[in-house]
Image (cartoon, rainbow, N blue to C red):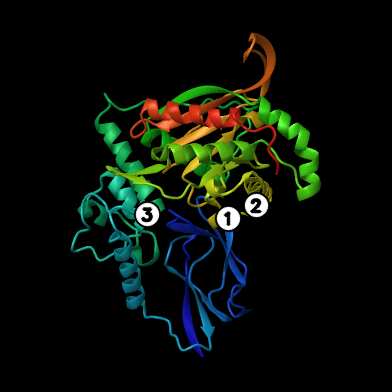
Amino acid sequence: MASVEMLMPKMGESIIEGTILSWLKKEGETIEQDESVLEVATDKVDTEVPATHAGVLKKILVNEGEVVAVGAPIAVIETSEEESVPSAGKTDEKADAKTELIESAPENTATILEEPNQSISPSDSRFYSPLVKSIAKEEGISGDELAKIPGTGKEGRVTKQDMLAYLDKRNTVSQASSPSIAEPKVQVSISASDEIIEMDRMRKMIAQRMVDSKRISAHVTSFVEADMTNIVLWREKNKSAYRAKYGESITYTPFFIEAVARAIRDFPMINISVDGDKIIKKKDINVGMAVALPSGNLIVPVIRNADQLNLVGISKKVNDLAVRARNNKLGPDDLAGGTYTVSNVGSFGNVMGTPIIPQPQVAIMAVGAIVKKPAVIETPTGDVIGIRHKMFLSHSYDHRVVDGSLGGMFVRKVADYLESFDIHSTF
């Protein structure tokens, strides 16, 4: 018999840690390869993690509720294979090697695993996760200062919670020493009739991400009104036949995503990310679509290579992802790799909205409700007034790297593609 370590797997682009929600197997139980062993929560999705080997779950190394970095050992499986568990020293060496590998990635690789402003003190032998290093860089914590932060993790390692607690204390001291520039804390008045509701984990993450995005990106929004009449008439005419042929309905969302994907090909500098002072131009066009969950929270699954799919292919992807999102069946890969996002605020009855950009993307489009309006129609014999189906497109973009001309031309091009839809097309 031999033993192998089960490591925290990488669960999607930019995911560098996960929280152990629950162990589905107990120590001593027999497990099959690819059988679910535990549930892990990331900042994007909750998912089950399968066993990497068949055998016996010999030892659980991480307790429920703990935060674990990607690549760190979480359990030991006893197998019949000729492998053994590295010693504690070797485990640390492996983690350090993994960190070095990540940090030595090519400069043009889009990543959030960045080194702090100052190198780690030579006298500091503690292992620091990529997340801790990223926080240190963002907050300007030097290597010497990082070495002085007390750690509550395994072998005294500094955890995310340790960093946040330290920053909170540091900010409090800083504000106390500079009362003239400190921002006043908002006091919330609570009466006996008020109900206090604790944010769930997803709501906390959404709140933090929204604040981070507004802090990182210079948000600007451009608006265009599109004539959706051809699409509305085509859908009304064909939706019954479409359902009979494919066994599912076709919504307006596939039309939006198709138009966005085509416009991205025309304006590829919308399909970018920012990494420090570098612009990462994405080759793939992966369009995320915001889906409202029963809880009221939003989640954004991704349609990969949307520009390579026809309308039927996009529709099938949209329906599949929407159903699995609402049933909490999405996997990490379903949420990773998005390069542009579409949010249908019209489904809530809103005519327009100003959405917040999901990092590290640089733009997002909100589509409003389709409303009948009187409009001037040009005809060969002169202008006439007619009833048209109109919809507002709201394009929010990061003004650091997307100028008003590009942001405005892009949303205009999306509207052009929607308006020029061939009412005689087939599926």
For marks 1 and 3 on the same chain, the one whose residue lies earlier in the sequence: 1
Residue hosting label 2: 328
For marks 2 and 3 on the same chain, the one whose residue lies earlier in the sequence: 3
Residue hosting label 3: 131
Tell me whether the residue at label 1 lies in contact with that at label 3, contact meaning CB atoms closer than 8 angstroms: no
Identified at 19% across, 64% down, the residue is 123
Q: Is residue 287 left or right of residue 110?
A: right
Residue 45 picture location, percent across and down: 56, 52
Amino acid carrying mark 1 in the image: Asp
The answer to whether residue 247 of the structure is visible from this angle is no
User: How would you rate the neighbour count of disc 1 (Cα within 10 Å): few for under 14, some for 14-19, many for 20 or more?
Assistant: many
Identified at 42% across, 57% down, the residue is 16
Residue hosting label 1: 46
Identified at 31% across, 45% down, the residue is 138
Quadrant in the rendering for residue 377: top right
Tell me whether the residue at label 1 lies in contact with that at label 2, contact meaning CB atoms closer than 8 angstroms: yes
Amino acid carrying mark 2 in the image: Asn
Camera-side residue: 307 or 359? 307
Camera-side residue: 420 or 56? 420
As measured in the structure, the alpha-carbon distance from the residue carrying label 1 to the one carrying label 3 is: 19 Å
